Image: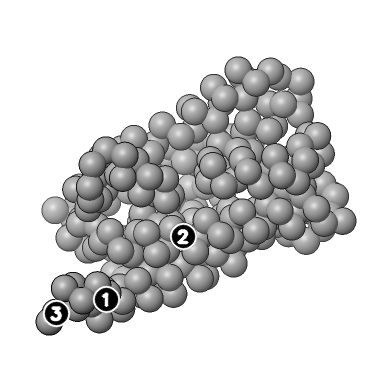
């Protein structure tokens, strides 16, 4: 009798679940701290701990949650908050199309599984050949989700204030997360030079008081370096 026939998870699949969960741990530590920041912001906007943690559990996207709550803090309505969060989430359409072949079942099941697709779980699930591993996606996504919701709850019920976000350096968590995503892909001199050029461009543009342009410049550098490597 095979493992599948007996209802047990095959050893290789158990290894994949374990690998995905372990790979998510470094990101989860940062996401937990990031969640504390969101919990503090949500509390300052008048959200209860239940409302803040429920939002994190259902939305599970830090950037859109920060944007939505920031709109409310600055006097905007719920429609404007939803619009801001939705615009920031449009990137997940592209990510969703890429990872769709790895998901299983009908539309309802795939819709549920896709809720665990964020930048970190997407990167952990990806292979060098551009394919995605469903088990790594789900296992890492669950661990990341738990860290995000737990961090939000701690920020919402704890004694933290908005000023503590700066005092404890929690505002630096977002760049750290993206560095963790980038670091495994810097295996060649060409990739390291591309990253260094993007960093230099970001520093210069920030010094020139146009930091928003740094993202566009970094994307152009990535496209050029990718084209040159073909």
Q: Is residue 125 left or right of residue 206?
A: left
The mark that comes first in sequence, 3 or 2, is: 3
Q: Do residues under tags 3 and 2 come within 8 Å of each other at their CB atoms?
A: no
Query: Which one is in front in this view, the residue at disc 3 or the one at disc 2?
Result: 3
Mark 1 nearby-residue class (10 Å; few <14, some 14–19, many ≥20): few
The mark that comes first in sequence, 3 or 1, is: 3
Q: Is residue 102 left or right of residue 210?
A: left
Cα separation, mark 1 vs mark 2, equals: 20 Å
- Disc number placed over residue 8 in the picture, else none: 1
Mark 3 nearby-residue class (10 Å; few <14, some 14–19, many ≥20): few
Which residue is labeled 2 in the image? Answer: 142
| In the rendered image, the vertical position of residue 101 relative to residue 3, given as above or below | above
For this rendering, which residue is in front, 189 or 74? 74
- Which element is circle 3 on? loop
| In the rendered image, the vertical position of residue 10 relative to residue 30, given as above or below | below
- Disc number placed over residue 2 in the picture, else none: 3
Q: Is residue 46 left or right of residue 198?
A: right
Cα separation, mark 3 vs mark 1, equals: 9 Å
Residue 8 placement (x, y as % from top left): 26, 76
Task: Give the residue at x 20% y 57%.
Answer: 131
Q: Is residue 4 visible?
A: yes
| In the rendered image, the vertical position of residue 70 relative to residue 110, given as above or below | above
- Which element is circle 2 on? helix
Task: Give the residue at x 54% y 42%.
Answer: 58
Mark 2 nearby-residue class (10 Å; few <14, some 14–19, many ≥20): some
């Amino acid at each position: 009798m095979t493992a599948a026939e007996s209802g047990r998870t095959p050893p290789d699949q158990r290894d994949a679940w374990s690998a995905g969960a372990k790979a998510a741990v470094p990101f989860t530590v940062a996401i937990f701290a990031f969640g504390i920041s969101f919990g503090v912001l949500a509390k300052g906007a008048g959200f209860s701990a239940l409302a803040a943690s429920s939002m994190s559990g259902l939305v599970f996207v830090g950037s859109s949650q920060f944007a939505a709550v920031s709109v409310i803090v600055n006097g905007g309505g719920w429609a404007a908050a939803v619009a801001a969060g939705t615009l920031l989430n449009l990137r997940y359409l592209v990510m969703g199309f890429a990872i769709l072949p790895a998901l299983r079942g009908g539309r309802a099941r795939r819709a549920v599984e896709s809720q665990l697709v964020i930048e970190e779980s997407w990167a952990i699930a990806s292979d060098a050949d551009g394919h995605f591993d469903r088990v790594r996606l789900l296992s890492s996504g669950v661990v990341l989700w738990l860290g995000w919701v737990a961090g939000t709850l701690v920020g919402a019920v704890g004694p933290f204030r908005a000023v503590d976000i700066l005092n404890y350096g929690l505002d630096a968590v977002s760049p750290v997360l993206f560095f963790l995503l980038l670091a495994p892909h810097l295996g060649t001199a060409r990739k390291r030079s591309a990253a260094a050029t993007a960093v230099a461009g970001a520093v210069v543009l920030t010094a020139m008081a146009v930091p928003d342009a740094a993202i566009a410049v970094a994307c152009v550098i990535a496209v050029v370096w990718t084209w040159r490597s073909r």
